Amino acid sequence: MTQTLTKYAGYHEAFQALESSAPKSTPPWLHELRRQAWSRFQQLGFPTARRGNEKWKYTNVAPIASAAFSHPAALPSGAQPTAGRVKQLGPSAPGWTNLVFVDGHYSPALSTQPGQAPGIVVDNLSKATVSSPQLVQPHLARQAGFEDDGFIALNTAFLQDGAFIHVADNRTAPAMINLLFVTTEGPTPKVTFPRVLVVAGKGSQVSLVETYVSPAKSRYFINTVTEIVVGDGANVEHCRLLLESPEAFHVGNTRVYQGQDSTFTSAGFFRGAALARNDFQVLLDGTGANCTVNGLYLTTDSQHVDHLIGIDHAKPHGTSRLLYKGILDGKSKAVFGGTVMVRKDAQKTDARQTDKNLLLSPDAEVDSKPSLLIFADDVKCAHGATAGHIDANTVFYMQSRGLDLATASRMLIHAFAREVIDTVQAEPLRDYLDGLFSQAMPASSLRFGGTP
Amino acid sequence: MPLLVIRDLHASIGDQEILKGVDLTVNAGEVHAIMGPNGSGKSTLANVLAGRPEYTVTKGSVQYQGHDLLAMPPEQRAREGIFLAFQYPVELPGVRAWQFLKAAMDAQRQHRGLEEMSARDFNRLLQEKVQQVEIDPELVKRNVNEGFSGGEKKRNEILQLALLEPKLALLDETDSGLDIDALRIVAEGVNRSRRPDNAIVVVTHYQRILNYITPDFVHVLMDGRIVRSGGAELALELESRGYDWVKEAVS
Amino acid sequence: MVTPKVISRTTTSEALDQGYKWGFSIDIDSDSAPKGLNEDIVRFISAKKGEPEWMLEWRLKAFRFWLRQKQGEPAWANIHHPVIDFQDIIYYSAPSSKKDGPKSLEDVDPEVRAAFDKLGIPLNEQAKLAGVAVDAVLDSVSVATTYQGMLEKAGIIFCSMSEAVRKHPDLVRKYLGTVVPYTDNFYASLNSAVFSDGSFAYIPKGTRCPIELMTYFRINTANSGQFERTLIVADEGSYVSYLEGCTAPIRKESQLHAAVVELVTLDNAEIKYSTLQNWYPGDKEGNGGVYNFVTKRGKAQGRNSKISWTQVETGSAITWKYPSVILQGDNSVGEFYSVALVNNYQQADTGTKMIHIGKNTRSTIVAKGISAGHGNNTYRGLVKIMPSADGARNFSQCDSLLVGDQCGAHTTPYIEVRNPTAQMEHEASTSKVSDDQLFYCQSRGMSVEDAHSMIINGFCRSIFQELPFEFAMEASQLLKVSLEGTVG
């Protein structure tokens, strides 16, 4: 234990400081939750790729575990980004509800809430735990268990702020809820622990986008946990966007719970970060639940992105569609570990899982593991994975019509990406993403081989 | 003794009752046509007779050659000489058509106390039937119904009919989706299998096939009951006046 | 040292002999080593076989490495079994009537010969399997090799591993452990230390082996493990088709089988390796049965060479094997065709690894898993495309069929691509025998059981096609017997 204490001394001090400086209003149950999580983290520590630890087979988090980070106690005093700057950092559109967090802390000045609709609560979590504990407590840390995950335990131990969205039964949130988490440049690498809790009541509807962004180029560590409860018959549209600094470590855990006949649609977009981990687990725990989980990742230089996606069909008549696409350039590496589980009771499940990768550089690497675990006999399950480069014949065809190689290939890569971008329903968001990914398309290190 | 006697037959799928009291007697040597609008229960009747497990018989009886047909599992019905030409023949990936036919033939022969046919004899018989029904000989080398066109699937059913020589053939919408040439070939196949000791029940929506296969009796099935029976002329009347005419006449 | 008590799961089942028709045991005094494993046992085995010093040294190195493996048995597979007490196993067991193996087929113990006859593997020259040379391995020792004279004329060496170590030491030293080094994994280390026999084949340059080579393995002695080692080398431009069959008698206790197979193909050579694995699967409650922990790997070392694995796995309580190909030579080809069936409480975690190193290397994987009863079937495969493998191609297809609602079918492909010019595709599906298909067959007069058997055989057709004809017939029969009682 002494050894553990020394090992995580920085976190230990920060935890003591957090607990001792906590405002009086902090409810006792939250203190208790943090203490339990902290104690669990001390036991678990950071994961290692020990034998049999399939979840971390291809990703080494030693750079995170061994580094020291400062814990920002409040909003940065001086250098807050301006509202105008914030707008440029992530997606935005008129009429959206915007919650902005800077270095893990809620910024009322940068956030905008155009009018409250009845039955809809959109607030920062530290306030909501005090003002509406009856809505928060029953759900917080219920979907994202920290018993067997060091990163979730750490986030929960340092749970301080984030976003809370609650939509009452049969209500529809009128506007897109835009959550922006900004990490600023600082003298030392910092760590933040954003938390998002979304509760969509029976028959309700809500759309949200989480964006994690930094104008900085420097190193930091961001450890996020998002919990989403989709009630019976509810419809949640979700988008998760990573635009981190090229030096950042981002470890995100998302846990989704779906009730009967509910629909959950999610699209994830990943750019930036030296190391990004996207652990995204959906539990279809009601008959006839329906989920779509898509992702698009673009990696360059020495970036490493690791997606661990799980779709767990626990009840009959569920449908799931999982599509992840990667574009890899430079010396980057992408890991896709998808698991579709169909439990014994989940008869008539219809599940499909696909991972497609485009390798643009001879030094890029993709490790894909699309698994199916099936315990029910009357199911329709399929998975597929492809990796390769742009079809040389197609490029040649385009060239023969007068396009240069770079334009032709960029066009094809963009088309490859579009399949995921087009799944985003909200038009302003879709346009934003399309712009973002069409600008970023690499073509430089492209080379062709194999087919003549 | 009649070949088949159906009395007050009621059958459902799930909670929905489809047959609501069908009475029908078929004697050896006869051809019956069962006609009716979509959803009247024609296909259900054919499938219930063949023993499709999704259907539950809730009331009534079916005597086949003096035995309780409903007590028999589907394969026993087949071995006793009942043949259903499927409306939607099923694909069996990896199972060669000739292999499937030989297995069926062997099972039926064994049931009748006959020896299994040698591969050579079977092949000779199969080739003969293949020519009769004008089917592409390559089809029997392929997987059962896999990648077959609609017409090929139907012809494959008729090939099986010719090969297995059933006592009671039930043709479930075998004519639907066929062009005129295929229809002629299918009908010729059926006519060729007509013998004094067997019977054929043609389930169809259209009168068209009855230009080639002349029925002894025509029955109109509506809302799960036979509402009108007659000779071959009834089919022509239906053709010219439509089903509404019968509906009005009945109500 | 206290060792946990293991593999001995007792059974009260009366139905031991039902269902497994290969389950008779021959009563012959075997010349066995005492239970347990230490350096003396390794020396005993080596001495028994009259091995040269280098062979003993290699075994001892492997044994010491095995002891040092702190990690113990691999833990990543989706299999569950009691802890294995490696000191509770007999590591050497040979029929005792001869000291150095039979000099000729006439010397083979009549009872052994009768046993192989019963398996349908006649050893006497009159009734030899037409066109197949058989090396029969009973427990740990090769008891007979047929057709040797004919093979010798063609310059082909096909003999037991013991004989090869004595008569062809240079070839064995050159290739043994080059594909599966003794450091490879826990069971490979163990095998390298204690392997008792197995088959050796060498096909000289430009020779097409005129008949199929076959090894028939059988575990007979109770409490014994079988650790055979097979090495096949196909020299430039040669071809061989090799068959392997396995059975074991019914035992209440589980038995360990940890074999190693190494294949090497030089330029333009081809090895086709087919397996019918029907080790005793345990009874209906999951008692007894063989733990089949096998390392099989081929190295397509030469340009344009080809290694093809076809396996039909119906037996064993637990199967843990991944016949693999290292595609080193440019334009080399690796293939893996597999049917794995689990019933009752059988577990299978099987698949392949295709490691693409050479340019324009190609691999094909077609795996069919059938799960019935309470069986759990996992396909686990790795396709790795190294940076040097320009233009590499892989196609993988994994299909699972579930029979009943108490079983599981799992597919875990690992795909690692480090070359942008490579193309790989993986497809998988899971289905069951549909009610419509069953009714269609029934309405043509087939029983439910025959209908199932026919549909399942159809599902496996593309794999059976890869087997030599006699083996394909037997595979189809095996499948039928293995599924008996699961439907109807």
Image (cartoon, coloured by chain):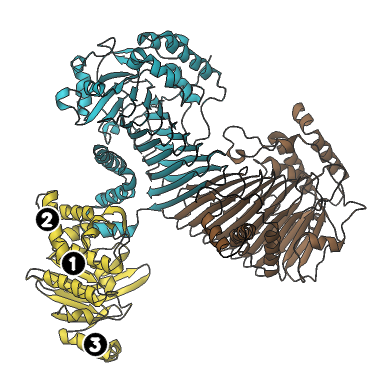
Q: Is residue C35 visible?
A: yes
Q: Which of the numbered marks, if any, corresponds to residue C368?
A: none
Is residue A286 among the parts visible in the rendering? no
Residue C161, image x and y in percent? 35, 19
Nearest the eye: B176 or C51: C51
Supply the letter of whichever chain is yellow.
B
Chain C shade = cyan
Residue bearing the label numbered 3: B238
Q: Which residue is mark 1?
A: B134
The amino acid beneath tag 2 is Arg
Q: Colour of chain A?
A: brown
Q: Are marks 2 and 3 in contact (CB under 8 Å)?
A: no
Label 2 and label 1: CA atoms lie apart by: 15 Å
Query: Which residue was labeled with disc 2?
Result: B124
Secondary structure at numbered mark 2: helix
Seen from the viewer's position, the closer of residues A135 and C110 is C110
Whole-number angstrom distance, CA of label 2 to CA of label 3: 43 Å
In the rendered image, residue A345, in percent from the top left (x then y), is placed at 47, 53
- Image side of residue C485 versus residue C307, left or right: left
Report the residue that reaches farthest toward the left.
Answer: B196
Q: Amino acid at mark 3?
A: Leu
**N-term-proximal mark, 1 vs 3:** 1
Circle 1 chain:
B
Q: At which x and y percent is residue C279?
A: 33, 31
Question: Is A402 rendered above or below residue C467?
Answer: below
Q: Secondary structure at mark 1?
A: loop
> Which quadrant: the C terminus of chain B?
bottom left
On screen, residue C249 above or below A351: above
For the point 34% across and 22% down, which residue is it?
C200
